[in-house]
Image: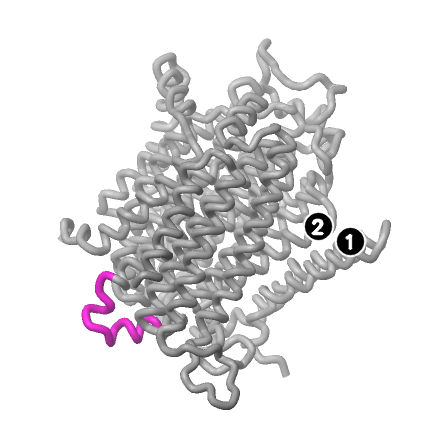
Amino acid sequence: MMRLEDLAFAPVVLPLLGAAMAFCAKAFLKGRATRILEYAGAAVGLGLPWISFAATFQAVMAGEVLQGVVGGWYGGVGVLYRFDGLAWLVNVLGYSVAIASWVYSLGAGPRGPTFTAVFLIQTAALAATAMTADLFNLFVCLEVMGIASYVLVASSDKPGALLASFSYLMVSATAMVFFLLGVYGFYRLTGSLSYVGISEALRTLPDSGGTAALVSLALVTAAVAVRVAVMPLYGWLPDAHALAPHAISAVLSGVLIKTPLFALSRVLLILPAGSLAGEMMGYSGAVTALAGVILALSQKDAKKLLAYHSISQIGYVVCAWGAAIAAGMATETGRIMMAAAFLHAFYHALFKGLLFLTVGTTTDCAGQRDVHRLRGAARLLRSWGGERIPLTLVGFSIGALAISAVPPFNGFASKTALSEAMKGSWQYGLLFVAGIGTATSFIKLSRIYWPAGKGVVGRPRDAATVDVAGYPRDTTTRATVLLAEGWLALLCVAGGIAASPIFAVVYRLLSENGTADAVSLGLYSWPNLLKTTLTLAGGALLFFGVVSGPGSAALKRIRERSLSFHGLFVSFAFGTAFLTWWLLYGFRFLR
Amino acid sequence: MTERLLLLSLFLVGFCGVLANKNIIKKIFGLTLINNAVVILFVLEGARVGQHAPIMEEGIETIVDPIPQALMLTAIVIGVCITALALALAFRLYRNTGTFNIDAIRRKVHDAS
């Protein structure tokens, strides 16, 4: 009889098995057999874990926590894991987008067993990150996830992607060294590595470990914040996400920046002073939401615009997440904020994945990524892409409406839940303004589909597509591409329509003991609809401001601000120092 | 105390390398240095409680704390992977742009796109 505790490992072990199958396919087989084994590996790695989610759903819904020590070692030596509602939710988020991205990659590249294997390793790492309850194991999981993603970003062989991957690697590996220093601090103070062990030992120390514990906490938090890409640690993200292959961009933006965040919430919720660190993260999230939108508005590269929007949207998530941690999960406001944060993270993964895939398909088909120059892409998709039914266009429209929070799509539900939860705080105002900016920049982006005037810029019919190995040379949209887009579009619509029951499930799963009272999400109230109308009207007005002379000159200046490699490290050092100062002295200013 | 000061200076040298050196190979060296500084710090911490390697034989009594050593083996492996990958990326950047200077690479990549 298989125990549920064993099933909880399926999302980690099965993708690794799939990766091994894909590597074997590359090493030992030739021709058709390679592909069959590779696809079988992907099916094992991305498909079978769903059985485990289905099997464990009832248990985690009832508030049961599947936990123990990996490999049956005794506590204190072994690695603790904890598969609860949070881990379940983060896994479902990750796997929904991962499947779509992998299917998309079959049509649009990168292809091959090596890619599949690395992709599966990354998926395994994110599942492991979601369920670890041990600080050193968190370090290992984050590093494995990171290494897989550096490889995947670099897998489009453009020099820009190589540089982006290199910068991402350097800044995040350096941050992980600081994380390790934080682990050292905690180990020295407490002699323990599991979250529970550290927290219990710290509480017996005078002043909860004092300065040393706070500095260690700041180091750990700041290192994870680099992965989450909140201000001011976002610098590596735009290039990495914009220059990676489209399928990878979808996973990076949709999943990889959120998994570390929710893994960090386990640490912050249990350690003393964790709520202070969460509070600071929440403030920087609110600033990130607005700053990300302003930067996004100034971009002219279609995928870079989307990448900056990922920063902005993760800002929304972090804002509510930080407020939830500051309030604590024992309070109802805290639980509602955390549920809203997760709901937005989940829905953002779906619609941003969809946007990256559809915009990627469009720009590949047109051979042009500049949003100021590309026009008439709807026609190009029909004539060159061979799309009788304009599925890519429909998918883009759904994604753009969702991110601009238009009902009934999923973005409306999650943004409304978020702003309901944050109502009355100063962050609420920032998020509202960021919402207007989001609407504006998607009006700007959707212009690529508008009918072309005389200034149509596309690529001559016979010119080669992006001349990179593994990319299709013809511009026909493949069936797998449409399938992936269709799946995500479907989830976006379904998530919007069924938002209330989904929110109730998320709320229940995140409430620790499962005894939480039910909550309802009042979505379609008059104030909410009025707010949406206001946001859209503001967005349209702002759009005219942006395309005017002074507006575009100001944005050009923002776009061409100088970015340097060492700036990434300076901002990391500055951010860490600031967080340390905040934990030691700064928070007193607000009390 | 001396050991810790030496490790701090090793760490700072490495961090300066990552931050200020223009050559990407030397940046990777810097990353390795800071990683190693933290690894040695951990091992040093484990050695506070004893002198001998944790291999239980006749006459061995005061052993060092084995957990930091086990952890650091893992950290060293990860560090090697990162270094190898970073060097591979540096090589491909060199092949594409003909230079190891980060500013020159940035300029060339920017001009190409």
Residue at 34% over, 45% down: A573
Residue at 49% over, 57% down: A142
Query: Above or below — where is A266 with respect to A470?
Result: below
Residue at 23% over, 61% down: A211
Q: Which residue is mark 1?
A: A26
Q: Does the image show residue A487?
A: yes
Left or right relative to B49: residue A30: right
Query: Above or below — where is A42 with respect to B98?
Result: below
Q: Which mark is residue B41?
A: none
Residue A488 x/y as whole percent: 58, 46
Amino acid type at mark 2:
Thr
Residue at mark 1: chain: A
Residue A568 x/y as whole percent: 41, 39
How many other residues sit within 10 Å of disc 2, few (<14), some (14-19) or many (≥20)?
some
Q: Main secondary structure of the magenta part?
A: helix
The image quarter containing residue A566 is top left
Residue A124 x/y as whole percent: 58, 60
- The magenta segment: A198-211
Q: Which residue is mark 2?
A: A114
Task: Determine if the magenta segment contains residue A207.
Answer: yes
Q: Are marks 2 and 1 in contact (CB under 8 Å)?
A: yes
Query: Above or below — where is B10 with respect to A434?
Result: below
Amino acid type at mark 1:
Lys
Instruction: Give the quarter of the figure containing the N terminus of chain A.
Output: bottom right
Hey, which residue is sitting farthest top in the picture?
Answer: A454
Query: Above or below — where is B64 with respect to A90?
Result: below
Task: Determine if the magenta segment contains residue A228.
Answer: no
**Which of marks 1 and 2 precedes in the sequence?**
1
How many other residues sit within 10 Å of disc 1, few (<14), some (14-19) or many (≥20)?
many
